[in-house]
Image (tube, grey):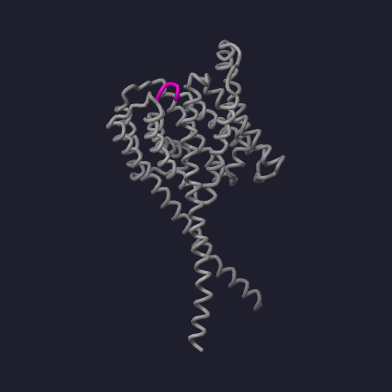
């Protein structure tokens, strides 16, 4: 009798265990697939933008115009997906006050980031641009301290010093350094840091949580307007002087589609993992871009000092991501413990009311 019960329990537990293992493997496989998709799209988009802006065959050396196309395309596609086809949902809670004080600054900084970052590709190599981007945590930290979102500590100060030192060494090892390109790239870094700061203010201080699709829905039109105004004065006259517009629309539409697909991949990765995973995947993507750019572009010449400095900077970025991960885990466990402690008090008071 006992043996039959054990066999019956074992026979029922094996399929359920196999089902759990199967679901786990499926979820893990899907997560890694999304990560690989993000790395591939992010790297490919960088190479695609460099090719469109620098290639004589495409003949489109207009970074401001290219970024404007991206934002207009994203705005139209987001509207179709959310309002016409209703495949995706936009969260409620957006007000005119929040849009004016948060979304417009985010859109302006996003436009500034893309514009200056794409312009840098006209002057410096893709690999060197990625090395300069490693300074991003330093810019975010400094601006976060100024905005009251970050707290100065000796550990973080040391990490920021390591990242800064690594970027300086990588820059020192650059053979054909172009300071105009460096200024454009660093301007893009500052714009991205300000965008992240405004995003954090939007979430923490105003309590509005938006998924990436909602962010694109609200931010893309604003960014398009912010790009359209300088495009009229800075690039449109150059495009008119170059004669009739003979650009390749298929290539430009594909470039816009890749940008939108990249934003969707960010949404998929964050929804299945976390925002920190995007940072870690971004580190892997940066190395992929740096190494592949040597093969794909003739203007990329890496030195041992380049790689040594970039390795130091990436080590600092990894330490910063690890610090953020531990801080987020500590905050999550603290919130869970507070919720657990609050439950007996509610039950106790409820029982007292029942007895009374």
- Looking at the picture, how far across and down is residue 89, in whole percent? 66, 46
Quarter containing the C terminus: bottom right
Q: Nearer the viewer, residue 244 or 7?
A: 7
| Left or right: 145 in relation to 104 | left
Residue lying furthest right: 84
Q: Nearer the viewer, residue 228 or 151?
A: 228
- Relative vertical location of residue 325 with respect to residue 161 in this rendering, above or below: below
- Looking at the picture, how far across and down is residue 148, in whole percent? 47, 41
Q: Is residue 122 rendered magenta in the image?
A: yes
Q: Magenta residues: mostly which secondary structure?
A: loop
Look at 54% across and 41% down and name the residue there. Answer: 201
Q: How many marks?
A: 0
Look at 68% across and 38% down and name the residue there. Answer: 80
The quarter of the displayed image where residue 74 is located: top right
| Left or right: 290 in relation to 198 | left
Residue lying furthest left: 304
- Looking at the picture, how far across and down is residue 206, in whole percent? 59, 44
Q: Nearer the viewer, residue 298 or 111?
A: 298
| Left or right: 75 in relation to 312 | right
Look at 65% across and 42% down and name the residue there. Answer: 94
Q: Which residues are magenta?
A: 120-125
- Relative vertical location of residue 73 with respect to residue 281 in this rendering, above or below: above
- Looking at the picture, how far across and down is residue 268, in whole percent? 55, 46
Q: Is residue 9 rendered magenta in the image?
A: no
């Amino acid at each position: 009798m006992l043996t039959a019960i054990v066999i019956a329990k074992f026979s029922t537990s094996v399929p359920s265990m196999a089902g759990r293992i199967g679901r786990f493997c499926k979820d893990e496989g899907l997560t890694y697939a999304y990560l690989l998709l993000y790395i591939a799209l992010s790297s490919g988009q960088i190479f695609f933008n460099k090719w469109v802006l620098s290639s004589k065959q495409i003949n489109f050396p207009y970074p401001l115009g290219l970024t404007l196309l991206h934002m207009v395309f994203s705005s139209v596609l987001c509207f179709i997906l959310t309002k016409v086809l209703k495949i995706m949902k936009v969260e409620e809670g957006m007000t005119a006050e929040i849009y004016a004080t948060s979304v417009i600054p985010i859109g302006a900084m996003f436009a500034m980031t893309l514009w200056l970052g794409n312009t840098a590709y006209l002057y410096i190599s893709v690999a060197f641009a990625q090395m300069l981007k490693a300074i991003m945590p330093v810019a975010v930290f400094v601006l976060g301290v100024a905005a009251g979102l970050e707290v100065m500590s000796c550990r973080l100060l040391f990490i920021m010093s390591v990242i800064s030192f690594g970027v300086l060494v990588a820059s020192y090892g650059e053979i054909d350094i172009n300071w105009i390109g460096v200024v454009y790239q660093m301007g893009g870094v500052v714009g991205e840091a300000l965008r992240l700061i405004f995003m954090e203010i939007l979430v923490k201080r105003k309590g509005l949580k938006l998924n990436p699709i909602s962010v694109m829905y609200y931010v893309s039109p604003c960014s398009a307007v912010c790009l359209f105004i300088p495009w009229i004065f800075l690039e449109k006259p150059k495009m008119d002087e170059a004669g009739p517009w003979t650009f390749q629309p298929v290539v430009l539409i594909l470039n816009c589609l890749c940008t939108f697909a990249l934003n969707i991949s960010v949404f998929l990765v964050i929804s299945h993992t976390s925002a920190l995973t995007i940072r870690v995947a971004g580190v892997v993507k940066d190395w992929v871009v740096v190494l592949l750019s040597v093969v794909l572009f003739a203007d990329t010449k890496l030195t041992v000092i380049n790689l040594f400095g970039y390795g130091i900077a990436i080590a600092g970025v990894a330490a910063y991501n690890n610090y953020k991960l531990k801080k987020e885990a500590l905050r999550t466990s603290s919130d869970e413990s507070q919720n657990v402690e609050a439950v007996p008090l509610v039950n106790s008071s409820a029982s007292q009311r029942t007895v009374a």
